[in-house]
Amino acid sequence: MGSSQGSMLTTNVAGLVDGSSARGEAYFVDCLPVYVKELIAGGAAGAFAKTATAPLERTKILLQTRTEGFHSLGPFQSLNKLMKHEGVLGLYKGNGASVIRIIPYAALHYMTYEQYRCWILNNYPSLGTGPAIDLLAGSASGGTAVLCTYPLDLARTKLAYQVRGSGGGFGNALSGLNAQPAHNGIKDVFRSVYMEGGVRALYRGVGPTLIGILPYAGLKFYIFEELKHHVPEEYEKCVVTHLSCGALAGLFGQTFTYPLDVVRRQMQSLQSSVQQGHPEFRSTVQGLTTIVRSQGWRQLFAGLSINYAKIVPSVAIGFTAYDMMKSWLRVPPREKTRFASA
């Protein structure tokens, strides 16, 4: 009898402890400001999506920067060659820098999008609540995220486009004569780039990046919201519908702005370009014209096919993870957030 009462007492105490810990966790989550919840949800979504598509991202960079031994290969041939020379881990080279960059980038991108959207609705109600608001808010949030995280993107590119040859050495893009020294990590990239040209060198290629991200981010959110308006009401909460709209928005936006991404990658990958005999891109327009003249107009779309294959699962995973994190963090619906802030 005593033992049975003791076991019941132990069970009740354990239940009370578990309940109090769950309530404590819920209380902690509820105490977080909405913008902090959006930062956490966006960062987690970006990390999941980027890691899942890292092999395709590295292959795309190798094709964009015309890395020696890869410029004449297709996407799947490039993947096979990477596997042969560097193994599975080679497919994720530069992913550390990419994830370190994407966590703050995605966190800022999602959070500032929500904040910019609320600010526009609260201060300029005459603009209405249509997709045009998403175009403005998406463009502004994309530019903000890029400016805050661009040096990490540059480091990711320099690490990703180094290829280990069969002899154990490193080969680089654009030239097989004066190969650039191999970088051993993010800190090494920052140190060498800073010594080369100071803070300005850390933002090499930021011009075409901003020119590309402003319309891309805006179009992505604009098309996504516009497509959702045409979805029947019974399918509005369907995850497949949600992800399909996001994937289509990403595909259309990426196609329109992809040449600017190619210019950005080549500007990032060029180092001491004058010494190596390559023309230095001093502006986005010069980069576009130089690539067309010396490499052909098709180079402006190099890697686009594999980018299509990358962006669909990336957008799908990103939107799904973001929605799940917002649900777990109990982020209030957009309209409630707007009226609360008003």
Image (cartoon, helix red, strand yellow):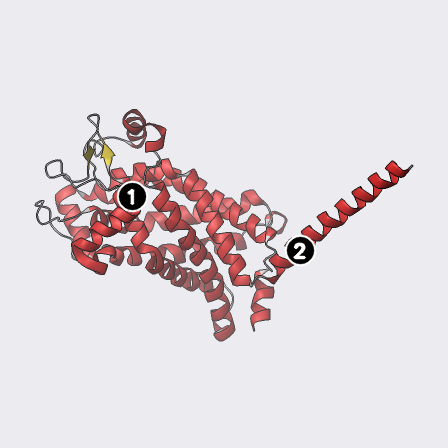
Q: Residues within 10 Å of mark 2 (few under 14, many from 20)?
A: few
Residue drawn where x is 42% and y is 40% of the image: 51
Q: CA distance from mark 1 to mark 2?
A: 40 Å
Question: In this view, which residue lies farthest toward the front?
Answer: 2
- Residue 148: quadrant of the picture: bottom left
Regarding mark 1 in the picture, which secondary structure is present there?
loop
Q: Amino acid at mark 2?
A: Gly
Earlier residue among tags 1 and 2: 2
Q: Is residue 31 left or right of residue 132?
A: right
Does 310 sit above or below residue 193? above
Q: Residues within 10 Å of mark 1 (few under 14, many from 20)?
A: some
Q: In the rendered image, is residue 131 in sight?
A: no
Type of the residue with mark 1: Gly
Where is residue 251 shown, x and y percent of the image? Answer: 39, 46
Residue 254: % across, % down: 35, 48
Task: Place residue 339 in its image quadrant.
Answer: bottom right
Q: Quadrant of the N terminus?
A: top right
Identity of the residue furthest to the right in this view: 1
From the viewer's side, name the closer residue of 176 and 334.
Answer: 176
Q: Nearer the viewer, residue 46 or 183?
A: 183
Q: Please report the residue visible at 20 percent of the width from the left and 50 percent of the height from the top.
A: 192
Task: Using the image, tell me which numbered label, if any, was put on residue 24.
Answer: 2
- In front: 200, or 265? 200
Q: Which residue is mark 1?
A: 185
